[in-house]
């Protein structure tokens, strides 16, 4: 039953999209970017709970680091204000640096953990930081379950 | 079917729904109506030019050359803040792609269960607990998302904006999470500039009148009269606005929440976002992190390589069906169960929406994406068929 993919390339070329699972934002601590730790039931037999939980926890910690209001953010804000924010045209903000780290982390997680299980995580920034989208694939060659009706709308994903 | 080769690279801003205008290949983002913004520019630049032309030569000689220098610095700061507020993305939330919208619809259907015939389905609201207060998240029928806390839909720009404050015609843009601090600094620095020019106009007129008499002074520097007029009227409005926003920042509220009275009144909940400390609130709003835009306006549109070829979509890669389905409220699709009375109503609402370019009909297995009107129509239709 387990679909084996050796790398991300194989996934892209051979797999067919079955469905997409969305992990929503957790607003219990305000408007800070956090994702819910609740494990979606659709992924029960695709991935271990601990692995997905670990990914979500790490992402949450990255976002918390980016949005932390402390010494560094004050310094950045005051310096930028003093230069009428022109410095933002040359300099990369701390948030942008953390976003690059996050995108690298997601890429790494996809390659090591998710692609071998036929899953793919989309970076939340591509979905407006509203949801963590996990695409579920079935190997075309293995004649898996027939694709659900959401596939036809999956074609207009981008 | 012959494939159409697209030679021009299409950037994402060209396909964004909503009523914004984009300039400089997606770098600049503004609302559609820019007339009042041009007026603002004209007033600021015009008044400052008059100040530099008429007052500054006299004042720099008789008082100090630092006066025009400081005025120039203040003027440049005001312009920088104005342009940043007007040209940047206020924190627009992108609309839900079809899969996400469908997923949410299915969750709502599951949560509502079976609505008894003839009754309206319950309003689409999600309750979340923030800092031990229950906050209601409303569903946006245009963007097909549950709005995050403090977000609101701007009808002028037709976008959901995060931490929506208000739509300001004077800057020609919405004021939201990403550009609120620039807007505040703009009003603050403009107040200072107005007071500065007003003060030195008076000083200049007084000093010159002592030498040459009041009427002669006005004849020599007619620009002064104009400046004083503009500054006088600007002073009351801009200083008042700055004071109002200072009050809002100290309470960590938005104009939108203040107008709606979200956190005021006895039976309403307290503001869950406030730290109950003026300094902390000011620091969070003004010195918080610089949030990046989630819109990716300048990214290139691309065909999704992961897509399986079940749809015989037109070969043109730039005809992206997403804007058509999410831009307008989706019409209810009549089928054999729709009673005849309901069909003209449906046809009328279908006429309002532009016909989608997609060749295939929407899959009837997915619940039709709803509007507040269709929520009521569905329940009436179900009632009639029973």
Image (cartoon, grey):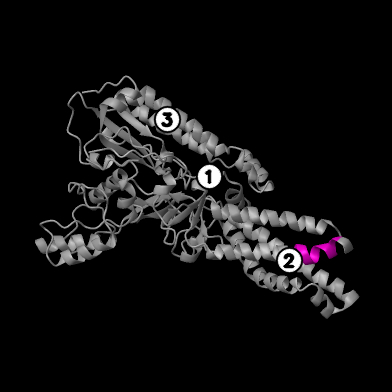
Residue at image location 38% in from the left, 36% down from the top: A37
Residue A103, quarter of picture: top left
Disc 1: which residue: B291
Q: Is residue A154 left or right of residue B159?
A: left
What segment carries the magenta color?
B52-60
Quarter occupied by the N terminus of chain B: top left
Distance from Cα at disc 1 to Cα at disc 3: 20 Å
Q: Check disc 1 and report its element: helix, strand or loop.
A: loop
Question: Which residue position is annotated with label 3?
Answer: A106
Q: Which residue is mark 2?
A: B50
**Residue reaching furthest to the right:** B211
**Is there any visible trace of residue A144 in the rendered image?**
yes
Magenta segment includes B57: yes
The percent coordinates of residue B322 (x first, y second) are: 32, 47
Q: Is residue A151 above or below residue B13?
A: above
Q: Secondary structure at mark 3?
A: helix
Front-most of residues B71 and A70: B71
- Residue at 41%, 33% (x, y): give it: A56
- Chain at tag 3: A
Q: Residue at x 77, y 56 (%)?
A: B70
* Residue B28 on the magenta span: no
- Marks 2 and 3: which is nearer the front? 2
Per the model, the C-alpha gap separating discs 1 and 2 is 38 Å
Residue B372 is situated, as x and y percent measured from the top left of the image, at: 28, 61
Question: In the image, is residue B378 above or below residue B231?
Answer: above
């Amino acid at each position: 039953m387990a679909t084996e993919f050796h790398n991300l390339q194989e996934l892209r070329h051979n797999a067919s999209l079955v469905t997409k699972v969305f992990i929503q934002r957790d607003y219990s601590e305000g408007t800070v970017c956090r994702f819910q730790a609740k494990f979606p039931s659709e992924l029960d037999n695709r991935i271990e709970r601990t692995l997905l939980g670990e990914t979500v926890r790490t992402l949450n910690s990255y976002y918390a680091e980016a949005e932390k209001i402390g010494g560094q953010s004050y310094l950045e804000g005051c310096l930028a204000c003093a230069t009428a924010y022109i410095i933002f045209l040359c300099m990369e903000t701390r948030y942008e640096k953390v976003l690059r780290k996050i995108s690298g982390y997601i890429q790494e997680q996809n390659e090591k953990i998710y692609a071998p299980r036929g899953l793919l995580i989309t970076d939340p920034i591509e979905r407006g930081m509203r949801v963590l989208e996990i695409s579920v694939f079935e190997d075309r060659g293995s004649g898996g379950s027939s694709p659900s009706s959401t596939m036809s709308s999956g074609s207009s994903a981008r | 079917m012959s494939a159409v080769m697209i030679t021009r690279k299409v950037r994402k801003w060209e396909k964004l729904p909503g009523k914004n205008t984009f300039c400089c290949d997606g770098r600049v983002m503004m609302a559609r109506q820019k007339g009042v913004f041009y007026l603002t520019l004209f007033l600021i630049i015009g008044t400052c030019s008059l100040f530099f032309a008429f007052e500054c030569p006299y004042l720099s000689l008789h008082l100090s050359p630092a006066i025009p220098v400081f005025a120039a610095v203040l003027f440049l700061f005001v312009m920088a803040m104005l342009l940043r507020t007007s040209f940047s993305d206020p924190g627009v939330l992108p609309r839900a792609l079809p899969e996400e919208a469908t997923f949410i619809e299915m969750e709502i259907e599951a949560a509502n269960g079976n609505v008894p015939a003839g009754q309206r389905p319950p309003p689409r609201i999600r309750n979340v607990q923030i800092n031990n207060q229950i906050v209601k998240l409303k569903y946006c029928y245009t963007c097909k998302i549950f709005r995050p806390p403090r977000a609101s839909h701007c009808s002028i720009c037709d976008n959901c904006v995060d931490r929506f404050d208000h739509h300001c015609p004077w800057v020609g843009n919405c004021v939201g999470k990403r550009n609120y601090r620039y807007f505040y600094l703009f009003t603050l620095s403009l107040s200072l500039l107005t007071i500065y020019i007003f003060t030195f106009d008076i000083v200049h007129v007084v000093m010159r009148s002592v030498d040459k008499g009041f009427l002669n002074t006005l004849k020599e520097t007619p620009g002064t009269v104009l400046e004083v007029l503009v500054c006088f009227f600007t002073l009351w409005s801009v200083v008042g606005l700055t004071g109002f926003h200072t009050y809002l920042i100290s309470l960590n509220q938005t104009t939108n929440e203040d107008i709606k009275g979200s956190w005021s009144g006895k039976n309403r909940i307290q503001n869950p976002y406030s730290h109950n400390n003026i300094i902390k609130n000011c620091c969070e709003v003004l010195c918080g992190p610089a949030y990046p835009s989630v819109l990716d306006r300048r990214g290139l549109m691309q065909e999704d390589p992961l897509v399986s070829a079940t749809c015989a979509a037109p070969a043109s890669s730039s005809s992206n069906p997403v804007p058509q389905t999410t831009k307008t409220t989706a019409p209810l699709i009549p089928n054999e169960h729709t009673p005849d009375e309901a069909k003209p109503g449906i046809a009328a609402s279908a006429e309002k929406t532009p016909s989608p370019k997609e060749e295939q009909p929407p899959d009837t297995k997915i619940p039709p994406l709803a509007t507040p009107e269709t929520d009521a129509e569905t329940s009436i239709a179900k009632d009639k068929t029973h």
